[in-house]
Image (cartoon, rainbow, N blue to C red):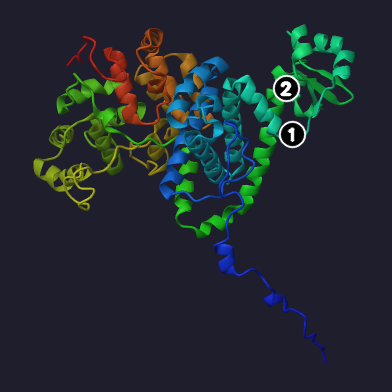
């Protein structure tokens, strides 16, 4: 007979904290302070935010990361990348230094900016930790963003931030600096004696600064690399990457728990898909083209400004006098985004479908066009607006084309040979451009390939607007929407101002 002790706790009934106490317990870091503009994101946020903020903050940060990755793919120099990304940071993810406010880091404005930066990083960490490829790309672009911010930080605030970090490095003592002074001067390029005497030197394990050791830019002795203050960015980046990669691995293990929350899972899934090509919503400014009468008769002429996906649809429509359902939907919404009215759109499609009778057109196609414009169908909230034009992300990820269909993205859905043939057909003979497109497609950088063709087709115009500063940097960011492609192409070729769209004396030729 088994004897049970009366004071022994049944393992199935172990004493645990009351779930109510867990639910209403106050978080340790609910009210986090942000004494520095820079952040290495070691402590996750725990305070509450609205679901709208959760999604919008992540989207704003994703815009910045996508532009940084695009700059890497285009092999832009650090100076070019900095010039390109600075106005975008001001617009989407602004972070002002402590010196910008008399209250310092306690200023509510600075706190809100840094709070958004903190939360948006961890939201995207949730979205991009599911696969090894996403984790690697996220760590790379976050490191590039950290580098950009660190380089523009003032010397005082940079020093305070570095002092606050608990990194495994050791300060070089004065006697040690005097002992190895000549070695420092010989091993460190462009090092001045003033930098040697006044600068702060640290020594770390040489494995943590491989790029400095590889470039023979530091003195190494007994397994330690002696790093001057001007090169300590490499140490910070190495530490930042190590902590971020470790955090991403921990996040990946915790991801299955999020499946229970049906509010966050769709948002995170949408964000991870947008990392291939950032999503873009179309505002009214994309449909306003002063001096450009968008009518059924002008579509053929305007097609020279279409991106390859829409130009392929237009060419197939003219060739076969017909498009299948998803091709018609993609093209109709694109034309709607250009500013084509529903009446003109009906005229355009009726003239294009010249092999069928009026009765067949009215029965099988007319309703779908009106439905796309919101004239019929749908609820009272959506009626009057209809569907939005498809973004590049939507075209890339939804409804891949089947046999006999022409919709989708040629960079994504065409074979390389067919893609090159199509580009040559529309007038892209440059072998260097075609080679770059092929390389982009093989690496699944479809939107970069599209932007590459755009930049080649508008080389002189882009050089002109950059030289006379008539376009802002935010108006020349990476194109991620077919309607943005059209508007930018039309404005550049027509000599119109990018911001206001006011004509400079050149009207559209009909």
Helix, strand or loop at mark 2: helix
Seen at 90% across and 14% down, the residue is 179
Seen at 46% across and 46% down, the residue is 54
Regarding residue 272, the answer to whether it shows in the image is: yes
Q: Tag 1: Cα neighbours inside 10 Å, few (<14), some, or many (≥20)?
A: few
**Of marks 1 and 2, which one's residue comes earlier in the chain?**
1
For residue 125, above or below residue 455: below
Q: Quadrant of residue 386?
A: top left
Q: Position of residue 240 (x, y in %)?
A: 66, 33
Seen at 29% across and 28% down, the residue is 286
Q: Is residue 428 left or right of residue 126?
A: left
Q: Nearer the viewer, residue 415 or 124?
A: 124
Helix, strand or loop at mark 1: loop
Q: In the displayed image of the protein, which residue is found farthest to the front?
A: 102
Seen at 55% across and 33% down, the residue is 105
Q: Nearer the viewer, residue 313 or 484?
A: 484
Q: Which mark is residue 177?
A: none
Q: Position of residue 133 (x, y in %)?
A: 59, 39
Please state, as top left, top right, bottom left or bottom right, where the N terminus lies in the image: bottom right
Q: Which mark is residue 211?
A: 2
For residue 135, above or below residue 497: below
For residue 198, above or below residue 145: above
Regarding residue 320, the answer to whether it shows in the image is: no
Q: Quadrant of residue 43?
A: top right
Please state, as top left, top right, bottom left or bottom right, where the C terminus lies in the image: top left
Marks 1 and 2 sit apart, C-alpha to C-alpha, by 18 Å
Q: Which residue is mark 1?
A: 167
Q: Position of residue 326 (x, y in %)?
A: 30, 42
Q: Nearer the viewer, residue 351 or 453?
A: 453
Count numbered badges in the picture. Answer: 2
Q: Is residue 14 left or right of residue 136?
A: right
């Amino acid at each position: 007979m088994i004897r049970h002790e009366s004071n022994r706790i049944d393992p199935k009934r172990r004493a645990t904290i009351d779930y109510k106490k867990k639910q209403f317990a106050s978080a340790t870091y609910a009210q986090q302070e942000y004494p520095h503009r820079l952040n290495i994101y070691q402590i996750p946020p725990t305070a509450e935010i609205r679901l709208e903020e959760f999604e919008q903050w992540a989207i704003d940060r994703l815009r910045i990361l996508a532009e940084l990755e695009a700059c890497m793919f285009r092999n832009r120099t650090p100076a070019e990348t900095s010039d390109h990304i600075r106005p975008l940071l001001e617009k989407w993810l602004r972070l002002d230094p402590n010196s910008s406010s008399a209250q310092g880091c306690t200023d509510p404005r600075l706190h809100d900016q840094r709070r958004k930066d903190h939360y948006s990083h961890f939201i995207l960490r949730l979205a991009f930790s599911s696969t090894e490829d996403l984790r690697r790309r996220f760590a790379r672009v976050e490191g590039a963003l950290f580098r950009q911010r660190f380089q523009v930080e003032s010397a005082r605030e940079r020093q305070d931030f570095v002092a606050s970090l608990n990194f495994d490095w050791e300060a070089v003592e004065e006697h040690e600096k005097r002992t190895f002074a000549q070695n420092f001067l010989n091993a460190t390029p462009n090092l001045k004696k003033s930098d040697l005497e006044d600068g702060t030197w640290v020594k770390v394990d040489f494995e943590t600064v491989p790029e400095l050791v590889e470039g023979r830019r530091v003195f190494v002795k007994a397994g330690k690399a002696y790093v001057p203050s001007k090169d300590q960015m490499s140490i910070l980046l190495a530490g930042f990457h190590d902590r971020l990669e470790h955090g991403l691995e921990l996040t990946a293990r915790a991801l299955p728990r999020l499946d229970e929350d049906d509010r966050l899972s769709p948002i995170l899934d949408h964000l991870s898909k947008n990392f291939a090509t950032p999503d873009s919503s179309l505002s009214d400014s994309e449909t306003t083209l002063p001096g450009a009468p968008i009518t059924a008769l002008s579509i053929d002429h305007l097609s020279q400004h279409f991106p390859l996906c829409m130009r392929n649809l237009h060419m197939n429509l003219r060739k076969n006098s017909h498009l299948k359902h998803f091709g018609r939907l993609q093209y109709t919404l694109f034309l709607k985004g250009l500013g084509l009215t529903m009446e003109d759109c009906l005229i355009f499609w009726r003239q294009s479908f010249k092999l069928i009778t009026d009765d067949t057109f009215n029965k099988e196609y007319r309703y779908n066009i009106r439905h796309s414009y919101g004239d019929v169908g749908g609820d009272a909230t959506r009626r009057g607006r209809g569907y939005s034009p498809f973004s590049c992300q939507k075209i890339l990820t939804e409804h891949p084309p089947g046999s006999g269909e022409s919709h989708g993205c040629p960079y994504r859905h065409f074979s390389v040979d067919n893609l090159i043939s199509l580009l040559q057909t529309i007038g892209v003979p440059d072998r260097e451009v075609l080679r770059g497109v092929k390389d982009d497609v093989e690496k699944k950088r479809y939107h970069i390939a599209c932007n590459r063709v755009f930049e080649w087709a508008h080389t002189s115009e882009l050089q002109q607007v950059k030289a006379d500063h008539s376009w802002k940097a935010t108006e020349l960011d990476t194109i991620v929407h077919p309607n943005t492609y059209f508007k930018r192409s039309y404005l550049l070729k027509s000599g119109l101002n990018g911001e206001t769209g006011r004509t400079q004396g050149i009207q559209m030729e009909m």
